[in-house]
Image (tube, coloured by chain):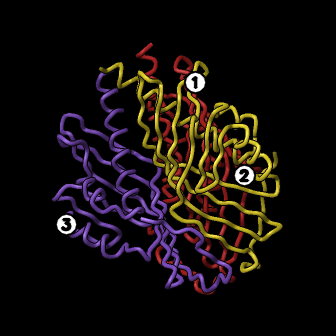
Chain colours: A red, B yellow, C purple
Amino acid sequence: MSDDVLARLDAIEQIKALKYRYVRCLDTKQWDDFADCLLPETTGAYAGLDFADRESLVAFMRKNMDESMVSLHQVHHPEIEVDLEAGTATGRWYLQDKVMIEKYSYVLEGAAFYTDRYVRTPDGWRIAHTGYERTYEVEMSTKDLPNWKLKVKPTH
Amino acid sequence: MSDDVLARLDAIEQIKALKYRYVRCLDTKQWDDFADCLLPETTGAYAGLDFADRESLVAFMRKNMDESMVSLHQVHHPEIEVDLEAGTATGRWYLQDKVMIEKYSYVLEGAAFYTDRYVRTPDGWRIAHTGYERTYEVEMSTKDLPNWKLKVKPTH
Amino acid sequence: MSDDVLARLDAIEQIKALKYRYVRCLDTKQWDDFADCLLPETTGAYAGLDFADRESLVAFMRKNMDESMVSLHQVHHPEIEVDLEAGTATGRWYLQDKVMIEKYSYVLEGAAFYTDRYVRTPDGWRIAHTGYERTYEVEMSTKDLPNWKLKVKPTH
């Protein structure tokens, strides 16, 4: 039993690291490494924005999360359940995100609960499905904030 | 000794999951599940707002965190100490919270350090005391932000 | 092997607790406890602001993060790699920070990726190097928000 507890804790740590890599690659726009967190058959469902496979999901991100967009995606409160025998897991996360597009004076702030599925592969755990439901989403314009300044932008 | 380390790590994971459930039920207004994270004798002390038992604490939340209020409570930096023999634990967390009441153009943003006590019961770990001290609290009015828009609200 | 997994998980928990203590002491301005997270030879590199040792790093914080400054530093997404034999570790974290100076109507919000090095000492793990690269940094003035109010400030 002690071995099972340990194997479960170890799997949870690996799944957390996978999720952190997924959002890090999203915010730093490293699309090849982002794609590597997913499987060819991975599906996505972001509050009404659906993807049937990895190819369409990554293509969308690559096109829309372009250099003009500065983003923050931080995920919290992992509630991860592992089925060691099946090599599968589910995960719930509490997202906080922010998107800024300076040229449109656009700022979005929101939060959401992620519901993910993971599978264990010979190369480690991968995301099989990822999706979220928003708790809220706020839009603002920096035109209302004349002294708002984006001082540092990421350099990729 | 190795078994003790493992039991402690396992207890810490369970206490984290309990705390995540507590704030998830708070932000999604699932008051029965929220109450289930506490014991009948659980006390609360939120920066001057005190509760002597679960009944009064949950009744307050149910009444005040109503549908007009959109909230975000995310807890970070768990520093959890477990006494395995006594079946008790303490936890420190770093909260970031946000409350929005659209009809009053009201936005609150703040942070605080939680100091919790937990006890192990036959049904799993429960919160015996929860409370926080604020590091800061900021109030704003969306009247100063004419383009501010609450695009998505939670549906419960 | 099972013992190694356990020792690694235990080290990761201790390193997380160390990092949480470091940022808690920063935001609560407990400079002696802050210094205790570092070694005399610890170096720092905060997006262009470099420190060659603990003495200069702590002296800078003590002087510049004074009582007029309210700060939030929350670190997320730990990706920690431990070399148990060498007694060393590396850590990546995703920071979200906020600084407010009321008398200057000044608000800064940003995010960054930390890259830390840790060493195991007879007194526990310590930070040997800490530094970050920003993904973004935004400055605002509360002069644009006439209803902005700092309701609660920390009392140290």
Q: Is residue C30 visible?
A: yes
Q: Which residue is mark 2?
A: A135
Q: Relative to C143, is A59 above or below?
A: above
In the rendered image of this protein, does residue A130 appear above or below residue B64? Answer: above
Which quadrant holds the N terminus of chain B?
top left
Is B36 on the left or on the right of C128, as rendered? Answer: right
User: Label 3: which residue?
Assistant: C55
Label 2 environment density (alpha carbons within 10 Å; few <14, some 14–19, many ≥20): many
The reply to whether dot 3 and dot 1 touch (C-beta < 8 Å) is no
Reading the image, the residue beneath label 1 is B124
Which residue shows up at 23% across the image and 43% down it? C88
Please tell me which residue is depicted at 51% across the width and 28% down the height of the picture.
Answer: A120
SS at circle 1: strand
Q: Position of residue A36 (x, y in %)?
A: 50, 43
Q: Say what secondary structure mark 3 lies in.
A: helix
- The type of residue carrying mark 3 is Glu
| Alpha carbons under labels 2 and 1: distance apart | 28 Å
Give me the C-alpha separation between circle 3 and circle 1: 46 Å
> The numbered mark 3 sits on a residue in which chain?
C
Q: Residue most toward the top?
A: A1
